[in-house]
């Protein structure tokens, strides 16, 4: 209930502030999914939440939860904290569990907002979560300067089927999935 109401309000605010130009399908299949996007602005999670038709549970840096009001709102919105310096097993297990329960997990695989695009910035945790939860990945590229009334372009890429990596050796599986996510977000050959 809270999610839908907050999403509705944020959609109004967002459409007043920005012009949306969405490329791709915003209807998500009713299967376990991980949405991975580049992260350029604080508005990115809100943007993803308002364009897709299913609720998204975001991993968010623990520091955001230190503010009592913001932390309360993030919890109500379905977000959960992650310590980016010391990611613990419980956080990963919780993420895998919610995806296995047919929820949509939202992750920014670079772990933070980035100015310089590089495959080295990508973290392999998202690949591990998707692989262990047997969840496909929807890569998303966001392009905008987020200035008032500027256009925010969203490119929703074709899903990456995790089953395509079943024959890949366990030693390199997460790296290969991470590489595929990077290439699809940024459309790199």
Image (cartoon, rainbow, N blue to C red):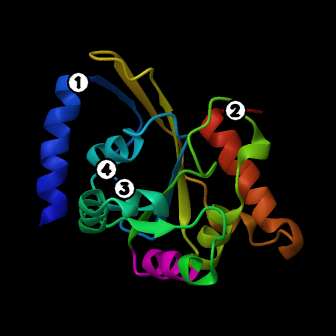
Residue at (63% x, 71% y) in the render: 87
The quarter of the picture where residue 98 lies is: bottom left
> What element does badge 1 sit on?
helix
Contact flag, marks 2 and 4 (Cβ < 8 Å): no
Q: Nearer the viewer, mark 3 or mark 2?
A: 2
Contact flag, marks 1 and 2 (Cβ < 8 Å): no
Residue range corresponding to the magenta coloring: 93-102
Residue at (12% x, 66% y) in the render: 1
**Residue located beneath label 1 in the image:** 17
**Residue located beneath label 4 in the image:** 49
Task: Specify which label sits upstream in the sequence, 1 or 2.
Answer: 1
Q: Position of residue 185 (x, y in %)?
A: 60, 40
Q: Callout 1: few (<14), some (14-19), or many (20+) C-alpha neighbours within 10 Å?
A: some
Residue 29 visible here: no
Q: Nearer the viewer, mark 4 or mark 1?
A: 1
Determine the main secondary structure of the stretch shown in magenta.
helix
Q: Which of marks 4 and 3 is in front?
A: 4
Looking at the picture, does residue 9 appear above or below residue 54?
Answer: above
Task: Specify which label sits upstream in the sequence, 1 or 3.
Answer: 1
**Residue located beneath label 2 in the image:** 117
> What element does badge 4 sit on?
helix
Q: In this view, does 113 lie to the left or right of 81?
A: right
> What element does badge 2 sit on?
loop
């Amino acid at each position: 209930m809270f999610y839908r109401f907050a999403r509705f309000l944020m959609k109004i605010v967002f459409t007043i502030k920005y012009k949306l130009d969405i490329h791709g399908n915003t209807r998500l299949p009713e299967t376990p999914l991980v949405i991975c996007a580049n992260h350029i602005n604080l508005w990115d999670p809100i943007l993803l939440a308002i364009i897709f038709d299913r609720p998204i549970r975001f991993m968010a840096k623990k520091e955001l939860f230190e503010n009592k009001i913001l932390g309360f709102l993030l919890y109500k919105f379905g977000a959960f904290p992650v310590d980016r310096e010391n990611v613990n097993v419980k956080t990963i297990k919780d993420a895998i569990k919610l995806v296995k329960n047919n929820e949509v997990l939202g992750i920014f695989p670079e772990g933070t907002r980035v100015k310089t695009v590089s495959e080295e910035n990508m973290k392999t945790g998202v690949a591990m979560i998707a692989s262990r939860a047997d969840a496909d990945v929807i890569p998303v590229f966001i392009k905008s300067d987020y200035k008032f009334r500027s256009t925010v372009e969203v490119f929703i890429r074709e899903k990456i089927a995790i089953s395509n990596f079943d024959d890949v050796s366990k030693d390199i599986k997460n790296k290969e999935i991470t590489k595929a996510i990077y290439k699809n977000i940024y459309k790199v050959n």
